[in-house]
Amino acid sequence: MKGEVEKVWKNETSDGRRYEVIQINGERYSLWDEEYFDRVQEGQVIEFDFRESGDFKNITRIYGQGEAKNEERGYDEQRLRKIIKMSCLRSASRVLTGSKIPSGERAEKVIEIARKFEKYVEGEEIDGEEI
């Protein structure tokens, strides 16, 4: 979401936890992360994520200047690549479980097989054949 901050209220729960209520484009959102408290000011345009919890809308992240929400997708893609690689390594190691290949050579063979699995998952060519 993106919008202009119209009003900011500082609040505290009965047990002493601090939070802020922020009105953006006519909607009220709760902000619990103290890291953001001093960054949000009336009149400011912010881009943010929120999560609904019952009747409340809780801000979960506020993006800084120059940091667009879609930049996070790059992080997600990197994380997904790592997950794919780890899954391929795990699968390749299972293929060689119980083999009589010496352990030093087995690690190299696991990586070789994992790379083939990874190429398969990504839809790339393996040994000159398109998948």
Image (cartoon, rainbow, N blue to C red):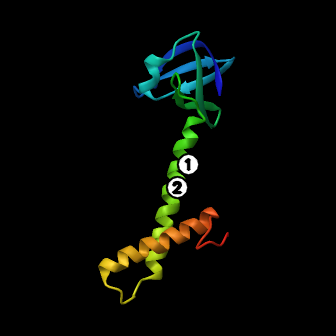
Which residue is under mark 1?
77
Horizontal and vertical percent position of residue 82: 48, 56
- Does the CB distance between marks 1 and 2 fall below 8 Å? yes
Choose between 36 and 11: the one closer to the eye: 36
User: Vertical placement of 131 versus 29: above or below?
Assistant: below
> Looking at this view, is 129 or 91 the one in front?
129
Say which quadrant the N terminus sits in: top right
Q: Kindly identify the amino acid type of the residue bearing the numbered disc 1.
A: Glu
Residue 117, quarter of the rendered image: bottom right
Callout 1 secondary element = helix
As drawn, 41 above or below 82? above
> Which of the numbered marks, if any, corresponds to residue 81?
2
Residue toward you, 79 or 43: 79
Using the rendered view, name the quadrant where residue 126 is placed. bottom right
Residue 129 percent across, percent down from the top left: 65, 73
Where residue 127 appears, as percent x and y from the top left, is: 58, 73
Q: Quadrant of residue 119?
A: bottom right
Where residue 69 sits: x, y (%)? 59, 33
Question: Is residue 123 at least partly visible in the picture?
Answer: yes
Screen quadrant of the C terminus:
bottom right
